[in-house]
Image (tube, rainbow, N blue to C red):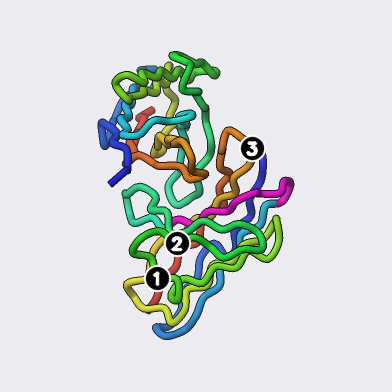
Amino acid sequence: SQQGEEDPQALSIQEGENATMNCSYKTSINNLQWYRQNSGRGLVHLILIRSNEREKHSGRLRVTLDTSKKSSSLLITASRAADTASYFCATDPYNTDKLIFGTGTRLQVFP
Amino acid sequence: GAVVSQHPSRVICKSGTSVKIECRSLDFQATTMFWYRQFPKKSLMLMATSNEGSKATYEQGVEKDKFLINHASLTLSTLTVTSAHPEDSSFYICSGGWGVQNIQYFGAGTRLSVL
């Protein structure tokens, strides 16, 4: 399977704490993206990091990419209860218009 | 951000009936539309990729006669689940791809329950 792996599968934290999710993938990529999914809803694009970038920030989100290890991490700082959702990484491989989604991390932030 | 409208959000049908799900890109022209299936607490499974005016490309193991995809215009793609059975019950999500960075914009999903 080409599907990426994410860990942890589930993460529970208190409001104000930081949440870190990791993603590993298998192929060479153009970019890597992170998406968020609220329960029973579609996915929302959060942030994209290109293959020649190592780190990117957007608000409380920080994404890193290590192409030599084929891995990425998403850090959410100062988490809020509203951050409760599932988070998926998705890779954009060469020579295809498909995205390959990871297995997802279910984040629960307790008030 | 770009908006994709998916309809209906929920459908309950009897076994043997066909169900059509619509996916519209409202404020952009999606070069490609994607259809996914998602099982509870699982990741998205790509079913097929469709481009306007051409036949959809199905992923391995997805029956094209079972899941009919029509992409009649740059803003509309439909998925028809033909002769639905209880095992087809699932959450179906569409997305529209746009731009060289291949960001996808997702519909809100359709929960199909086949009795």
Q: Is residue B79 above or below residue A108?
A: below
Crowding around mark 2 (Cα neighbors within 10 Å: few <14, some 14 to 19, many 20+) is some
Amino acid type at circle 2 is Tyr
Q: Find out whether residue B43 is within the magenta segment.
A: no
* Type of the residue with mark 3: Gly
Is B59 placed above or below A35 here? below
Q: Residue at x 33, y 26 (%)?
A: A21
Are the residues under badges 1 and 2 in a single subunit?
yes
Rendered image: mark on residue B58? 2
Asked if marks 3 and 2 fall on the same chain, the answer is yes
Label for residue A90? none
Q: Which residue is depicted at the point 56% across and 37% down?
A: B103
**Boundaries of the magenta span:** B26-36
Residue at the spot 43% in from the left edge and 30% down from the top edge: A29
Element type at mark 2: strand
Check whether the beta carbons of the residues at disc 3 and disc 2 lie within 8 A of each other. no
* Few, some or many residues within 10 Å of mark 1 (<14, 14–19, 20+): few
Quadrant the C terminus of chain A occupies:
top left
- Could you say which is closer to the camera, residue A63 or residue A40? A63
Q: Tell me how far mark 1 sits from mark 3, CA to CA.
A: 29 Å
Q: Pointer 3: what residue?
A: B99
Q: Distance between the residues labelled 3 and 2?
A: 22 Å
SS at badge 1:
loop
Q: What residue type is labelled 1?
A: Glu
Badges 1 and 2: C-beta atoms under 8 Å apart? Answer: yes
Q: Position of residue B29 (x, y in %)?
A: 71, 49
